[in-house]
Image (cartoon, rainbow, N blue to C red):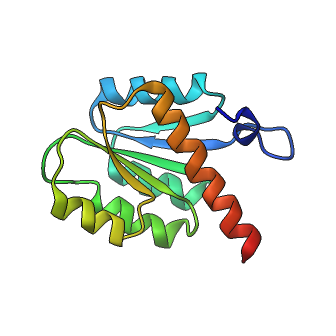
């Protein structure tokens, strides 16, 4: 993993928002990202997630989904307005292709199964942050 991308130019850790209504998953994915070198803010509802995006700056948002109907869809949509440029990764237990297409159209940086490995999650976070940095540099 490219540890350099977990640290900003001012020496502080990159800040990630993790949103998941499943408390066990919330702790698990937050801990993986913390061990990967990130500062993590965790919240257990999409409403709290949107509020966080409105009041704080994040480098990435990771949103969990439990069932086949994605209740986090509004968070993905509102993230684009509340925090333009902040990539959103969606982690899901179920593959619902209509849902995947919808969140990608709303601007999600990716939609992945929750069964991914800890190293893969860290890799996806780095990749999304790298993409954001490149887009900012080009703009």
In this picture, residue 13 sits left or right of residue 78: right
Is residue 76 positioned above or below 90 on the image? below
| Residue that protrudes farthest toward the bottom in the picture | 139
Q: Quadrant of residue 55?
A: bottom right
The part of the image, by quadrant, that contains residue 93 is: top left
Q: In this view, does 80 lie to the left or right of 85?
A: left
The residue nearer to you, when weighing 8 against 5, is 5
What's the residue at 33%, 45% (across, down)? 112
Q: Nearer the viewer, residue 45 or 27?
A: 27
Q: Is residue 34 visible?
A: yes
Extreme left residue here? 68
Quadrant the C terminus occupies: bottom right
Say which residue appears at 50% left-offset and 27% top-offset. Answer: 119
Residue 126, image x and y in percent? 60, 43
Q: Is residue 37 above or below residue 4?
A: above
Q: In this view, does 27 lie to the left or right of 24?
A: right
Depth check, front residue: 119 or 107: 119
Which image quadrant is residue 72 in? bottom left
Q: Where is residue 99 in the image (x, y as percent from the top left)?
A: 20, 61
Residue 59 seen in render: no
Quadrant of the image containing the N terminus: top right
- Pinpoint residue 35: horizontal percent, then vertical percent: 59, 22
Above or below: residue 137 compared with residue 123: below
Closer to the camera in the image, 15 or 96: 96
Numbered label tally: 0
- The residue at the point 43 percent across, 29 percent down is 29
Image position, residue 66 (x, y; %): 20, 40
- The residue at the far right in this view is 10
């Amino acid at each position: 993993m490219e540890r350099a991308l977990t640290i900003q130019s001012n020496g502080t850790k990159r800040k990630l928002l993790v949103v998941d209504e499943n408390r066990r998953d919330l702790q698990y994915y937050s801990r993986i990202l913390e061990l990967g070198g990130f500062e993590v803010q965790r919240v257990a509802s999409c409403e709290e997630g949107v509020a966080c995006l409105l009041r704080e700056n994040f480098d990435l948002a990771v949103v969990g989904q439990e069932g086949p109907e994605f209740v986090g869809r509004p968070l993905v949509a509102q993230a684009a307005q509340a925090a333009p440029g902040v990539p959103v990764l969606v982690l899901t237990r179920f593959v619902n292709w209509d849902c995947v297409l919808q969140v990608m159209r709303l601007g999600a940086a990716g939609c992945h199964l929750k069964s991914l490995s800890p190293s893969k999650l860290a890799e996806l976070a780095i990749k999304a942050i790298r993409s954001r940095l490149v887009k900012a540099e080009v703009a």
